[in-house]
Amino acid sequence: MSADTKSSPTRDVGYHTAIGRVREHNEDSLKIVRECSLFAVADGMGGHLAGERASALAVEVLQQRFLTHETEIDGSVLREALIAANAAIFQESVENPERRGMGTTLTAIYLTGNTYWIGHVGDSRAWLVRDQAGLQITQDHSVVWEQMRAGLITPEQAERHPMRNVLTRSVGNMPEVEVDILTGPSLSGDVWVLGTDGMTHVFDQSRVAEVVNSSSSAQQAAERMVEIAVAEDGSDNVTVVVVHCA
């Protein structure tokens, strides 16, 4: 987990993470890079300490790619960064048998003056709260969500399904990865929320909006979401990043 200490004149940013009430390690990572308006969460998997390493490596590679890129950044750069993270994690797992099969989710948002770009793999999520209404922007890459999209189960059944954590796509688990790139207009007053599945087990888009709208700052919103998720579930690590666009 890391965040820079530079202030942002246009964005109120908050973040919080917790180990939960069951896990022995926090395998989540987050990244806040204010100088290029990049924000990300990752939820690692792969056994003892491997998941923690996978998520940390994913967000570090993401940051490096953005900070060293010399031309205008757009969705193609974000896609390349996630693909680079996938390659780095997979290579490390090949070279270290104790980390074989490690991987991570990775959901990142890059904000320009009037556009957002999201790169997404796995079941961490990005929500947008606009005009006080919440909207889930990403779709999970999981067995259950594939069934939901095929019309086999309802969204309500998907949220409670015992196999909801079985992923169909992750970063680093295979030599290649397919990355979702999403884009749209970024407006003044928008609030972005990124969360790992320890938080998404408890929050839907309406509840995300409720906490954002009733909080005095991005930091307070992030802390409240994590506290609620741990209190009501707590079976997994919980990480939340909140970005308010002034």
Image (spheres, rainbow, N blue to C red):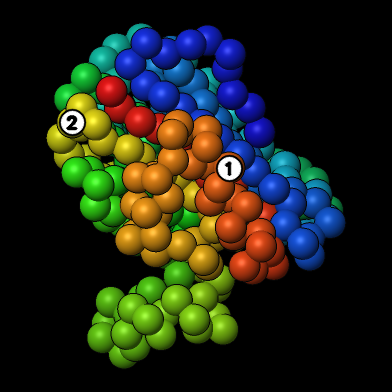
**Residue 57, image x and y in percent?**
64, 36
Q: Quadrant of residue 108?
A: top left
Residue 29 falls left or right of residue 135: right
Q: Amino acid at mark 2?
A: Leu
Q: Residue at x 39, y 17 (%)?
A: 36
**Residue 151, image x and y in percent?**
26, 86
Please say if 246 is above or below 154. Answer: above
Can you see residue 49?
yes
Q: Quadrant of the C terminus?
A: top left
What residue would you read off at disc 1? 223
Please say if 92 is above or below 171. Answer: above
What residue would you read off at disc 2? 187
**Residue 72, image x and y in percent?**
26, 15
**Residue 200, image x and y in percent?**
49, 61
Secondary element under disc 2, as helix, strand or loop, is loop
Residue 169 falls left or right of residue 134: right
Can you see residue 171?
no
Q: Residue at x 51, y 66 (%)?
A: 202
Along the viewing direction, whichever of 160 and 170 lies nearer the viewer: 160
Disc on the earlier residue, 1 or 2 = 2
Q: CA separation, marks 1 and 2?
A: 24 Å
Q: Residue furthest bottom?
A: 152
Q: Residue at x 18, y 31 (%)?
A: 187
